[in-house]
Image (cartoon, helix red, strand yellow):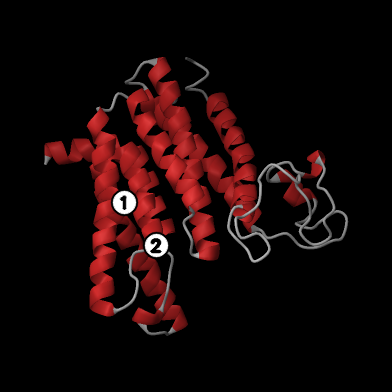
Amino acid sequence: MPFATSWGGCAFAVLLGLLWGSFANVCIYRWPPTEEFPEGRSVVKPGSHCSACKAPIHWYDNVPLLSYLWLRGRCRACGTSFSPRYLLVEALTGALFGVAWWFTLGMGGMYETADVRLVRFVIDAWFVFTMVVVTFIDIDHKLILDKVTIPSIALAYLAGFALGHAWWEGLVGIAIGYGGPWLIGELYYRLRGREGLGLGDAKLLALVGALLGWKGVVFSLFGGSVIGSIVGIVHLARARKEIMTTELPFGPFLAAAAVFYLFAEPWIELYFRLV
């Protein structure tokens, strides 16, 4: 597959990721509950529109990355500023799709047959898309939505069969992914009288376990803890607040560690075998 290993193939994956990143922005904005929409909103209708003046956004003003730049981050109709985070989500999703392409269909995935590599790319791309949506909803609302995690757990478990996993691997991953954080959160609540890890984090790790197994859960939990500790220390140093009263969502750190493990798993496994 010469195209897959070329720069053109990687550029195609990035472009695909930018398009899905645009859809991720819609999910991040519409899925969380609000006072007006307790169940969240549809991502299908109404079409894209300005949240201030409600004017529809035409297709030529809805091109990932470029539209924001040529409109200078403002609505064409009313001039209201759009958050630059739209750019971040699109760029991040595009970059992760490019990385997924390289590790599956590109030079990083040459050890498997073409059909398996294609399936792996689709699964990896879906997984990173889901992690992006979970991350930014959790940052905004400190919520990890059941409407995202529960269907994704089932999809991830089924995806494991497409990758040749044994039927029990995903189930063990789900059990450890959900049960471990639940136990940690329960102990923390008993000792401190306040919530430590929420069930949303447990369901997110169950999703990780369904696809990446118990090793992915362990890596994500400890890797997320390390990332969260570093970010928390920096945040506290800047905010000058008491450590136990500073609340940071844990989901983004778990998601970051899970995405890292998704791509680095073969090298991590090789390292521990050599050690």
Element carrying mark 2: loop
Q: Quadrant of residue 251?
A: bottom left
Q: Position of residue 185 (x, y in %)?
A: 29, 65
Percent position of residue 230, x then y: 35, 67
Mark on residue 53? Answer: none
Q: Describe the element under mark 1 as helix, strand or loop.
A: helix
Residue 246 picture location, percent across and down: 41, 77
Residues packed near mark 1 inside 10 Å, few (<14), some (14 to 19) or many (20 plus)? many
Q: Is residue 80 left or right of residue 176?
A: right
Q: Is residue 85 left or right of residue 222?
A: right
- The numbered dot on residue 250 is 2
Residue 35 position in % (x across, y down): 64, 66
Instruction: Using the image as rendered, state which of residue 86 and residue 7 is in the foreground.
Output: 86
Q: Which residue is mark 1?
A: 220
Q: CA distance from mark 1 to mark 2?
A: 11 Å
Q: Residues within 10 Å of mark 2 (few under 14, many from 20)?
A: many
- Amino acid type of the residue tagged 2 in the rendering: Phe
**Of residues 262 and 218, the one drawn nearer to the viewer in this rendering:** 218
Q: Residue at x 28, y 59 (%)?
A: 182
Can residue 180 be seen from the camera position used here? Answer: yes
Check disc 1 and give the amino acid type: Ser
Instruction: Locate residue 171: give its quadrant.
Output: top left
Give the mark, 1 or 2, whose residue is nearer the N terminus. 1
Marks 1 and 2 close (CB-CB < 8 Å): no
